[in-house]
Amino acid sequence: MLTSISRCKPWLSALLFTALTACDPAPVEEPTPVAPVAPTASPAALLLFPNTVFTQRVVELQFIGERTHFSSASRVDLGDPAIHTEVHAHSPGRLLIRTTLDGDTRLGTHDLKIITPVDTGSEEVSLPEALTVLPALRAEPAAQAKSVPQGGLIDTSVLNHDFRDNPFSTNSISIVRGPRLLRVNGVSAYRYAWLGLADALAPKGPLEIVLSAVNPIGERHSFRAGRDDLGLPLVQLRAPTLLEDGQLLTGQRLPEPMATNLYRYEADVKNNLLFVQLEKAEAAYLQTGPILAVAPASGRFAQGAIVPAASSHDGLVTSMAYIEQPGTTYFSLLAPDYSGGALGYGYAIRATSLPVIPIELREPAGGDTPARPLVNLTISQAVASQSAAIEPSTDMDYIRFTPEQDGYIYAQAAGDPPLATRVAVLQADCSTVIGTPRTFQQEAEVQAGVAYCVRVSATAATPYRLLLVLQPKAK
């Protein structure tokens, strides 16, 4: 067709050719291929497990990373100097972390950072809020008072958060910090409740509680309540009443149930015996006497002694305590059944300290008998033995003594537990009873130059501390 047109009308052919060639696209140049750029391979943190632990534990943690190069030179930082770690690289992407958490470990979440030396410098991976540290104990507010005075009684109850791995069990628990144990109120795998005595110098604020317990496989662990636990009782400050040596302080009373009176006494640093007497004692103290809790200058009753009973005559009640650390001494006085009231709980109090002569009470071969006592003593004031023991439970110890002055002899045998012992005062034959057998402590009137005997027995085999004190008659 184009040929015929060009023959008939050449100008039209040229015009058509120009139009057709003008619509053809221009040739496109192919782009030079570019090689793809590989993404940067940065190390990353994936997972830490377990991610919740308790204070004062040794825990194996595992950390999983991606594109990491963990090694034995890796360093772990949890932002807390009370957390100590040792590492073992199971593989470049898996790090085992043996973690020791001290009692001062900060509670709450901890960021984790791991730094590993590599050929190009160091490799760092981090995981925010990777580890949560919890207290193993939580207070049970419904089971205890909201506050307690220094040197005061309180029913205390705590719950064990770690009961699955480390359950509580009877007779496996000891109180490291907190109210001094007087009576256990209940024990289960996840709960411990007791009647205790707050320390004489317990700091103001939440009551500090730390327990120690042995788990079913024989491992001992510590259990601490968090200081921010809102269920903890608050300690209230109170000034102890100062007792001067030999001073009679009148008008004393335990006015209500669970009441205590706190005293401070400056014992001579050479004297190891605290000698406390209640004069004009009312009815509550005449049967078994008050309970006396004694603490050294630290104010901690756990470092002192609990004197659970006393003896009495003619309204004069006598309690004695051996003090390991003479000097500033605190003691709290409690009713024998932890009660109190407007009537029957009044008294006047006098305290003094005495030097103590130590004696040995070793069982001879073949044992001792009334005819052959452990020892023959002459007593002018006070003697003490730390080496006595009842073994087996059918055993009886005999101690013969002669007082240098007329007066009263006080004999105390503190066993383990303290009330396991019974004490009697006898005539020189160690058979005829003067002061009938009594739990823990007995007394009797004696004459100068006349021999007497003390007999100690127990409900079970036990070591015991013996105190013998002569109080001369007033001239």
Image (tube, grey):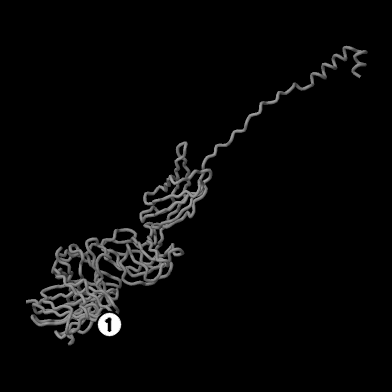
**SS category of the residue bearing label 1:** loop
Q: In the rendered image, which quarter is residue 327 located in?
A: bottom left
Front in this rendered view, residue 91 or 468: 91
Query: At 39% across and 51% down in the image, what residue appears?
Result: 84
Front in this rendered view, residue 374 or 143: 374
Front in this rendered view, residue 118 or 281: 118
- List the single residue furthest toward the bottom: 432
Question: Position of 52 compared to 395: left or right?
Answer: right
State the quadrant of the N terminus.
Answer: top right
- Whether residue 141 is situated above or below residue 74 in the rendered picture: below
Query: Residue 43, how many percent across, how many down?
Result: 51, 42
- Whether residue 407 is situated above or below residue 294 in the rendered picture: below
- Whether residue 271 is situated above or below residue 421 in the rendered picture: above
Query: Residue 149, how many percent across, how many down?
Result: 29, 64
Query: At 8% across and 81% down in the image, what residue appears?
Result: 449
Query: At 15% across and 75% down in the image, what residue appears?
Result: 469
- List the single residue furthest toward the front: 365
Looking at the image, how many numbered discs can be counted on the residues?
1
State the quadrant of the C terminus.
Answer: bottom left
Q: In the rendered image, which quarter is residue 21 located in?
A: top right
Query: Residue 12, how many percent across, how many down?
Result: 88, 14
**Residue holding disc 1:** 394
Question: Position of 233 compared to 399: left or right?
Answer: right
Question: Position of 230 compared to 332: left or right?
Answer: right
Mark 1: which amino acid?
Thr
Q: In the rendered image, which quarter is residue 435 located in?
A: bottom left
Query: Residue 463, how many percent across, how many down?
Result: 26, 74
Q: Mark 1: give few (<14), some (14-19) or many (20+) Cα within 10 Å.
A: few
Q: Residue 313: tell me if it is visible.
A: no
- Whether residue 306 is situated above or below residue 49 in the rendered picture: below
Front in this rendered view, residue 196 or 253: 196
Q: Residue 461: tell me if it is visible.
A: yes
